[in-house]
Amino acid sequence: MVIAIDGPAASGKGTLARRLADHLGLPHLDTGLLYRAVARDLLDRREALEAPDLAAAAAGALDLGRLDDPRLRERHMGEAASIVSAFPTVRSALLSLQRRFAEREGGAVLDGRDIGTVVCPAAKLKLFVTASPEERARRRLRELRGNGEATAYEAVLDDIRRRDERDSSRSAAPLRVAADAVVVDTTSLDADGAFARALAIVHALDAPARAG
Ligand code: DC
């Protein structure tokens, strides 16, 4: 079973994807890390984030063995990833890699912005996980502080709003709800509540098959 989980920054989609994957015994790919890694490689080489050719070359040469780099979780890397992810050439360089991951036997869970709309349009289950910008900023702030990054709430809220705007308004695979996605609003749900809601949706999918 392929599960596609999309949503804006800090909506809780990553935590939910990881927990669902663990529970169902499926491999998980956080596709945001791919865009963050492209941005990191450009920044490491002191190359411009705004140059589509350089960004596409970095995407084509991406080393998947370096996705556990803690720097990828830093605040400025999210912003940099959002910039490079708007280039269609970067997106197409990363597309086949994501599709190969999704085509593994038994299925997979992928989370990102365009999984249900572009990467895995035939996914058995599509979730669109969202929450208010203020709640997402509070969560991201906790996460950044947990990683030792000192940041103010207002700065994080500004980041979130800017990223929402850029990720939703780009012409290549913008963030949007797939027509057949189930929307899960986690504004007033904690991680356990979001997981329970998602699991109920998974079980409801299986129910007709079991009944038959
Ligand atoms: O999910 P994240 O915050 O790690 O993503 C970082 C940026 O990468 C996000 O602002 C937009 C981009 N991204 C994307 O365009 N498509 C995806 N499937 C995942 C992330």
Image: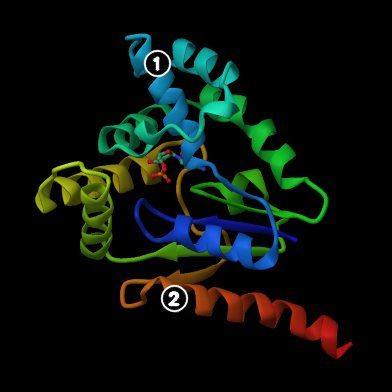
Splitting the image into four quadrants, where does ligand 1 fall?
A: top left
Numbered marks: total: 2
Left or right for 174, reference 134: right
Asked if residue 36 can be seen in this view, the reply is yes
- Mark 1 and mark 2: span between their CA atoms? 37 Å
Q: Residues within 10 Å of mark 1 (few under 14, many from 20)?
A: many
Q: Quadrant of the C terminus?
A: bottom right
Q: Is mark 1 within 8 Å of ligand 1?
A: no
Is 112 drawn above or below residue 26 in the view shown?
A: above
Q: Which mark is residue 182?
A: none
| Marks 1 and 2, the one that precedes in the sequence | 1
* Residue 75: % across, % down: 26, 38
Is 192 drawn above or below residue 178 in the view shown?
A: below
Q: Quadrant of residue 52?
A: top left
* Residue 163: % across, % down: 30, 43
Q: Quadrant of the N terminus?
A: bottom right
> In terms of secondary structure, where does tag 1 sit?
helix
Q: Residue at x 12, y 53 (%)?
A: 153
Q: Nearer the viewer, residue 90 or 98?
A: 98
- Disc 2 designates what residue? 192
Left or right for 79, reference 208: left
Q: Nearer the viewer, residue 206 or 152?
A: 152
- Disc 1 designates what residue? 42
Which colour style is shown? rainbow
Residue type (three-letter) at the residue carrying disc 1: Leu
